[in-house]
Image (cartoon, coloured by chain):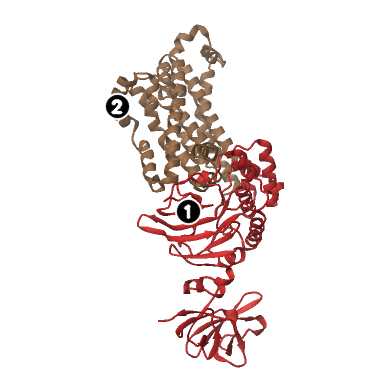
Chain colours: A brown, B red
Amino acid sequence: MSVALRRALLAVVGLVFLLPIVAMVEFTLRSPSGTGYGLDHWAAILDPERERSYRNLFEGVGNSLTLAVLTAALVLVLLVPTMVLVSLRYPRLMRVLEFVCIVPITVPAIVLVVGLAPVYGVVVRVAGGGTWTLALAYGVTVLPFAFRALQTDLSASNLGTLTEAARTLGASWPRVLTTVIVPTLRRGILAATFITVAVVLGEYTIASLLNRVNLQTALVQVSRSDPYAAVIFALLALLFAFTLLLLIGRVGTARAAGVPTAAPADPAASASALAAAAPPPSPTTSSKAAR
Amino acid sequence: MTSSSPVVPADRADRADRADPTSPRGAGASVELRSVVKQYAGHTALNGIDLTLRPGELVAVLGPSGCGKTTALRALAGLERVTAGSILVDGVDVVDVPTHRRDVGMVFQSYSLFPHLTVRQNVEFGLRMRGVDRRGRAARSGEALDLVGLSALGERYAHQLSGGQQQRVALARALVTRPRVLLLDEPLSALDAKVRVQLRDEIRRIQHELDITTMFVTHDQEEALAIADRVAVMRDGRIEQVGTPESLYSAPQTEFVAQFVGVSNRVPGDVVGGLARVAGAELPVVGAPADGPVWVLVRPENIALADTGVAGVVEAVMFLGPVCRSTVRLANGTVLQVQHRVEERRPAGTAVHLRFEAGAVAVLPRD
């Protein structure tokens, strides 16, 4: 493929991604009077007098961030040791684990919710109806992304030999985990964390159907009364997801350049998962922005 | 199985002293594998092996792929739990001692440097695990890197080193704690031929300097013969023969050893009165076998091209650098490998005569 053709393709793809974002930015900059542009809508979000209007939105942001942290912790605490254990001790079970972890991506969210509804009946009785309990459901939905991110690093690193080398050098299992396994899988762990955060920030269906407030449900709600605020928050969420993507890329590049790893960088896998998980503008807000 | 106690002394100061790679010789331990059995599901990897390593000795464990040599080494390291038998280090059974307390240093076949650490940090890893302070670690890692000639590369990462350099760092890392036993699991097999010979000689030099008991696993017979004080040849989970390289080469006790260690011609003959009669020649025999039909094992370098002697026809000639090896078919159909000078090379199809040199030959019973 020639350089010119490559650049042309890149430009077309860039435009496809850029146009809706530019349209959203343009929408948020429209003056309330209907003529000209200004930062009035952006300033209004920070206006203390209008705090009540956006209370639900800020609550949604807070809930989503809490859920992101909880889900990431849940996934890492459960998935990393499991994958390491399976990889080192029971490599034949990796296929089974992969199947189990990938299954959630094949189940539509609505079906997942139908299954989760009775489960949450029990969860509410045991742990209360706090929004944080959504982290349990999100832990399942992010499994495919987190698994892939970790699997890339795991399969490319010679973890078995590294672990054995550490053992012969006098490291106990806890020290092997902290001084060898986690640093070796650092890139995969970071990618899994970032992707988890992005997926959780973009989740709408489960929260809506289980009647919880998170960023996306709050966006839809606020878009009915203030579409500008909804688009602004959607843009900020996109920016946040984009920053995470850049961070993943930087981690990969840093490793390739200075801090080595046996794992080749796999930005494509991370990027595609992150792009898929990035919170899109809700249907309501995007349609209004396009008008 | 006898009860076991940790091989590693609890006192860290003692350990730190022993971690000095420049400390006097004599730190090597005696190692004894007694009737060690290792079974996986339906497969016996080690079938009751017995092997003793004397303090400071380098024993090469030689055998084809799947013979159990790496399993034996891993059992000694504690990376494989044995099914039966005992492993004694300085007379103490270590079968129940976990790997990280066995006080062994190990170099693996595949590169095993920690990718997130520099060369120096890699070498210091074992000292960190033993609680050696920063100054002590710096001094000892420096000495260990000096030992392998890589003190200038301390701040590099593994991916910035060649394969040979990585294995030398792995060797320094394994030695810096001054373990009582050094285990080398085919450490040269991933390297190119020239580097392999250089590193092999270096391992031997360092092992001599430190007088450390060493088990060296390899499938390369040349490597085993060149480096080892003694060689243990393994086959199907058993040890076929243990001996000095010279004794293995000149007096193999089984056909497998004869074929695996060097190239050997197996010729039918008879022992009569302490001499082997083969193809019209009478040759002195290793040992004192009974009279009767035997297989006579003759090395290619013990057969020479001559003007008179056993007649044959050259079938093929292989150029090996300083020498050539010709395949000669005798009139009775026996095919022999003959090693000779390059100038004596004859083209395929040439009629030649062979003379058996006077060196003692090994014989095996022939039914």
Q: Amino acid at mark 2?
A: Val
- Say whether residue A68 is visible: yes
Instruction: Write down the residue under mark 2.
Output: A119
What residue is disc 1 on?
A: B87
Q: Which residue lies most toward the bottom here? A: B308
Pointer 1 indicates a residue of which chain?
B
Q: Indicate whether B127 appears above or below B224.
A: above
Residue B269 spot, x, y in % from top left = 48, 86
Indicate the quadrant containing the C terminus of chain B: top left, top right, bottom left or bottom right.
Answer: bottom left
- Can you tell which quarter of the image residue B213 is in? bottom right
**Quick one: A151 or B42, which is closer to the camera?**
B42
Q: Circle 1 sits in a helix, a strand or a loop, which is it? A: strand
Chain letter for mark 2: A
Q: Name the amino acid, label 1.
A: Ile
**Category of crowding for the residue at label 1, using alpha-carbon neighbours closer than 10 angstroms: few (below 14), some (14–19), many (at least 20):** many
Image mark for residue B217: none
Q: Do the residues indicated by labels 1 and 2 lie within the same chain of the protein?
A: no
Mark 2 residue crowding within 10 angstroms, few (<14) / some (14–19) / many (20+): few
Q: Is residue B168 above or below residue B330?
A: above
Could you give the CA–CA distance between mark 1 and mark 2, rounded to whole angstroms?
Answer: 53 Å
